Amino acid sequence: MPLISRRNWIGGSLFSTLALNGGGSVARAAASIPRPSMHLPLWPGDAPGGSGVTAEAAEIPRSAEGPADDTAFVHVRNPFLIHMPPVVPNGAALLMIPGGGYVRVAVGRGGRAMADYFARLGFAVYTLVYRLPADGWAAGPDAPLQDAQRALRLVRSLAVSDGFDAERVGILGGSAGGHPAARLALRQDIASYSPLDAVDRLPLAPKVAALLFPVVATTGPYAHRGSVEQMFPGGTTEVAAAPYAANALVAPGTPPTFLAHAMDDRVVNWRNSALLMDKLADASIAQQAHFFEAGGHGFGLEGPAAHWSDLFLEFARRHALI
């Protein structure tokens, strides 16, 4: 996969940006205007454990009928961050982890629109394009977690150069991307890879976590079977899969967590969020959970569940992310 340089600009030309000091509705309306972004390599060399990986990386259309810029990444071999700078910085950064059923990383138009939305609210936004567990990585189902942990540390290392507070970094993951995002937040006790450089000596410690319609269960009736099959392409047992559930354990350092799920979600059952909510409550972790009557799977900034973003911003302010 060609790339990747900090000076490689994509996603639209530079233009005079508007100073947006209003609420979410203002930024939502302005998000139709494309903004520039940059690609940043995640690892200093090859990603760890790739000797058995042979699949060729590609960026593909999300659907045959969709617009040309609505794409997803498959067979990722050189994971990277897409950095969208803030319009008027608020001093915080947000690591976004998109979904895709662990078959692809579906950045797409919706993901770019969401990154743009938060950038217009002042966040330095970094979207993670991560490795997929079924491609033969030595870490298997932990490969996305390796990338998520490295990404959070790399974002923190950029605080001075990119103009935000290193202590004010949040994470936001959705659907299958909610699985590594939840494990990143809840399982800071897992050392998923050996340190490579000074970046890896930085703490994880996200300020807050936001999980939208996340894949949580790896066993039982509410597990998202497609994601579990990708995590364990050779098959597995419930005993072997259980430790990889996002609610398997709440480790020390788990940040305040925001959950949003629609009860008419036909892809990832809303009980995934309920299971995680219960686990966080048992561990006395500050949390806020919203279960919307309607919204389906993958709701973004439009539709009956769109006001999740305003609710999240209130939560983020209350817990000092912004």
Image (tube, helix red, strand yellow):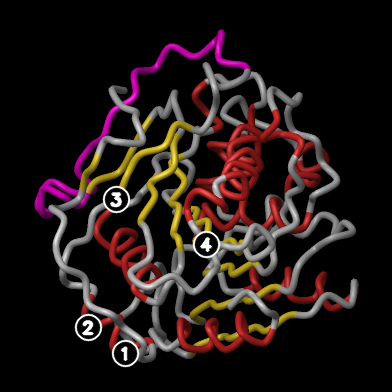
Left or right relative to 18: residue 3:
right
Dot 2 and dot 1 residues touching (CB under 8 Å): yes
Residue 197 at x, y = what percent? 69, 25
- Say which amino acid is labelled 3: Ser
Residue 105 at x, y = what percent? 40, 44
Quarter of the image with the C terminus in it: bottom right
Marker count (numbered): 4
Badge 3 element: strand
Pointer 2 or 3: first along the chain:
2
- For disc 3, the marked residue is 37
Badge 2 element: helix
Residue range of the region highlighted in magenta in the rendering: 49-70
- Say which amino acid is labelled 2: Ala
Residue positioned 48% across, 42% down in the render: 102
Which circle marks residue 25 in the picture?
1
| Towards the viewer: 117 or 38 | 38
**Height in image: 322 above or below 252?**
below
Quarter of the image with the N terminus in it: top left
- For disc 2, the marked residue is 29
Q: CA distance from mark 4 to mark 1?
A: 19 Å
